Image (spheres, rainbow, N blue to C red):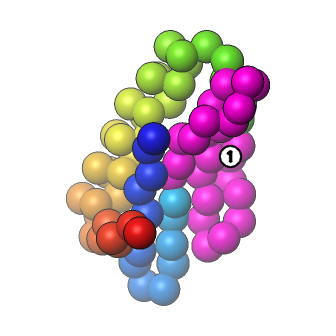
Amino acid sequence: MFAKELKQAGHTKRFTISQAGPEGWEVREEQDSHIVKQVFYQDWHRVERAAQIMTLRVSELQENGWQETLSN
């Protein structure tokens, strides 16, 4: 649904939003394979807001030299 992975100087950051079954959606941020933030939402409007924030965060990281990797 939403997945971005960025790398810089051997470090990785991942931002994902995925369907979490009947519970709603899982919003997750990882850094170097460690979960930094994990939230489950049932309200689609909260998911939309989380996606906007993630998009902004990815843009800020790219402005600071982080490179988006190709996903499978």
Element carrying mark 1: strand
Tell me which segment is drawn in magenta: 15-38
Residue 6 in picture, x, y percent from top left: 40, 67
Frontmost residue, 22 versus 27: 22
Q: Residue furthest bottom?
A: 10
19 lies left or right of 70 = right
Label 1 crowd (10 A; few <14 / some 14-19 / many >=20): few
- Image quadrant containing the C terminus: bottom left
Q: Quadrant of residue 66?
A: bottom left
Q: Which residue is mark 1?
A: 37
Q: Is residue 11 magenta?
A: no
Q: Image height check: is 47 above or below 32?
A: above
Residue at the spot x=61%, y=13% of the render?
43
Residue at the spot x=71%, y=65% of the render?
34
Q: Is residue 20 magenta?
A: yes
Residue at the spot x=35%, y=58% of the render?
61
At label 1, the amino acid type is: Lys
- Image quadrant containing the N terminus: top left
